[in-house]
Amino acid sequence: MRAALLATYTTALCRVSVALWLAGVLIAGGTAVDAWARLDALGALPYLAAAAGLAVGAVYTARRATWALLITLIAFGGQFAGVVGSAIQLAVGVDRWKAGELRALGVDPALGVAANLAYSAAAFVVFLLLLRRLLLHRRLLHRRP
């Protein structure tokens, strides 16, 4: 499994993956600061935890740890749900609870959901590129001479 993952993550795809993890750190960290200022420390806690987890993902993906590469692949694939959910919310209107949460943080709900759509779409595109390389690697391994 390690060899397949290392073959899948070219230097460029590894850098893009780390960049997406770090973008998540900035988003979650910035939201934590806003939540602390507008709400309270308890309101910032989920965002701080997310920022810490995303930072761990960035560091260990950069180090090409097998578990981190696998989690990156799975997490980025899971962003398809984020793309679909965000697109639906933009089409039919942002859920009342989500809109309230975003407004409490000083974010326009439609803008927040659109930003989530962009981030999720970027991560899912990287997943598709990774999946393509992984399948190509697997096909080359199982090729008969």
Image (tube, grey):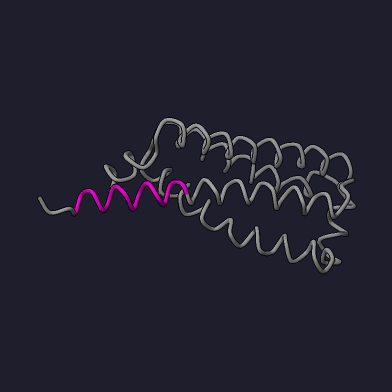
Q: Is residue 94 left or right of residue 68?
A: right
Q: Which residues are magenta?
A: 129-142
Q: Is residue 138 left or right of residue 69?
A: left
Measuring from the top left, give residue 66's x and y in whole percent.
35, 42
Measuring from the top left, give residue 55's x and y in whole percent.
57, 36
Outermost front residue: 145
Q: Nearer the viewer, residue 18 or 34?
A: 18
Label tally: 0
Residue 48 figure quarter: top right
Measuring from the top left, give residue 140's x and y in whole percent.
23, 48
Q: Residue at x 47, y 54 (%)?
A: 74
Outermost bottom residue: 92
Q: Residue at x 52, y 52 (%)?
A: 75
Measuring from the top left, give residue 121's x and y in whole percent.
63, 51
Residue 138 forms part of the magenta stretch:
yes
Q: Main secondary structure of the magenta part?
A: helix
Q: Residue at x 84, y 54 (%)?
A: 110
Residue 131 forms part of the magenta stretch:
yes
In the displayed structure, would residue 25 be above or below residue 100?
Answer: above
Q: Nearer the viewer, residue 104 or 78?
A: 78
Q: Residue at x 26, y 42 (%)?
A: 3
Q: Is residue 120 left or right of residue 62?
A: right
